[in-house]
Amino acid sequence: MSPALSGIVFIASLIVALAVAHRPLGDYMYRVYTAPGHLAAERVIYRLAGVRPEAGQRWSAYARAVLAFSAVSVLLLYGLQRLQERLPLSLGMPPVTGHVAWNTAVSFVTNTNWQAYSGESTMGHLVQMAGLAVQNFVSAAVGMAVAIALVRGFARGRSEELGNFWVDLVRGSVRILLPIAFVGALVLVAGGLVQNLAAPYEVTTLTGGTQAITGGPVASQEIIKELGTNGGGFYNANSSHPFENATGWTNWVEIFAILLIPFALPRTFGRLVGDRRQGYAIVAIMATLAVVSVAVLTGLELAHNGTVPQAVGAATEGKEVRFGVANSATFAAATTLTSTGAVNSFHDSYTALGGMVTMVNMMLGEVAPGGVGSGLYGMLVLAVITVFVAGLMVGRTPEYLGKRIGAREIKLASMYFLVTPVLVLVGTALAMGSSEQRASMLNGGPHGLSEVLYAFTSASNNNGSAFGGLTVSTPWYDTALGLCMAFGRFLPIVFVLALAGSLARQDPVPVSAGTLPTHRPQFVGMVVGVTVVLVALTFLPALALGPLAEGIR
């Protein structure tokens, strides 16, 4: 079977599996967030945390709960790393340096999981399991909670309450992420991934005294990070390491896990707003952008010009031979279309235009399908912007799902959209304007700019993947990228929750002859167009100086 045909079969099978899982998982998540009762384990958690699960929260209280929980999580994770040497299961690892501990704590709490270090030679078992793996769950659950709160804003009328953050957080972790992660870990163990705390765990001293770790609790952490659309791996080679991604079919399973929940959440959205057609429209927008991205990226890597790529049939540099070019490109598209960050090939070695596609995927706002929860609320914000633009074109007050999009709503949606471009472009400009920071680039010229642009795009969009070639384990980069992760995560969340509160207070607007239908292909095409145009207008100059300049010379 040719590489191109093999890639088509691989992608087609993923589409079929995601389509099959879309309805049952989406319906299940709908039942989770609307169930009147609480599980016994959940009631224990509420009692220990002093939470009143029956109490509703206004948007401001919901936002304070999100920020407070995240701030405490950062402090606890930072403390675990700094005190690692004195904790059990440290494996003799020294304390993590201050700037790396800050970057890592913010990274995992913001669902980014950018790693400026090699996991197996930096973190012991306790920090990996009680710190990083826990955040793989709860940071993803925070994203789902915020998405559900926004949907409630559309679904409710004359209400000040968006639900209870603590209930949404616990239910997302206990009823959704934990069960799927348990099953997924068993599947990966069957595929050859390591899951243990003993042999074959070994510490080997390399040249210069560096210690390398083999073995460890990999399988469960792998499915957790993929399911929660988190990057970060036990091994520095990430999902190209055979202990993290053993075979071609485990590669398929990991991509499926990355896309599973984000593609199912639109079904939950349709059920919650009482119109399943709205959910189908949102998933159609996500699928359109995703399929185009996968097709373009795979095509660029399979049909790149050049003597060597043409001789071997594809651009094979930086690709893992177990997976091949097409399946590696599919993984790259999936990981950058979501807020995953896991990689099974080196994006720095992609063709110039192929590397640009991975950046554009993140610059879209990671909405196709995006991170767990964050993809849905990002897409709904883009839908709000689209109906506002459409309203201006026909001279009507825009409406979406029975709610008027007035000055307050469009300001909040606009501020949401502007956060990450400001962080990406300002961060990249500051780095390129300093000779000391430019020294961290492996390459000069357009490719060097691409390395820096990719790093700030990944951090600001809470993706976590790395282009490679850029030395980021410095105090300046650790601090700057950590700030981008924090602002790129929590400012949009505050704007989303404020938008949800504003929508929930409104009286529903009855559908009229002038109401724009938001469940038809016309609206799907409009949202796709608005998304692409907004990104093009924002990032095209930066892309022209980096990957585009490299690709056309």
Image (tube, rainbow, N blue to C red):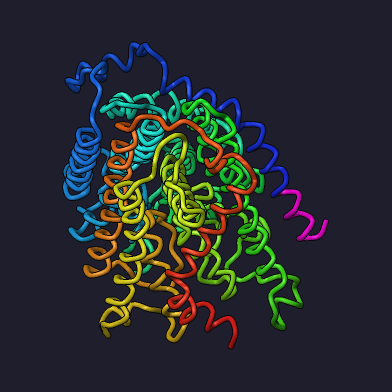
Magenta highlight on residue 3: yes
Residue drawn at x 33%, y 15% is: 41
Residue drawn at x 61%, y 53% is: 525
Residue 309 image-quadrant placement: bottom right
Q: How many marks?
A: 0
Residue drawn at x 72%, y 83% is: 307
Residue, far bottom? 553
Q: Position of residue 77 (x, y in %)?
A: 23, 44
Viewport quadrant of the N terminus: bottom right
Q: Position of residue 256 (x, y in %)?
A: 59, 41
Q: Is residue 300 visible?
A: yes
**Relative depth, front residue between 357 and 245:** 357
Above or below for 286 versus 535: above
Q: Could you tell whether 439 is left or right of 86 in the image?
A: right
Viewport quadrant of the C terminus: bottom right
Above or below for 171 versus 72: above
Q: Is residue 328 visible?
A: no
Q: Position of residue 241 (x, y in %)?
A: 53, 54
* Magenta span dominant secondary structure: helix
**Relative depth, front residue between 245 and 426:** 426
**Relative depth, front residue between 413 and 51:** 413
Magenta highlight on residue 428: no
Q: Which residues are magenta?
A: 1-10
Residue drawn at x 60%, y 37% is: 280
Q: Position of residue 231 (x, y in %)?
A: 43, 51
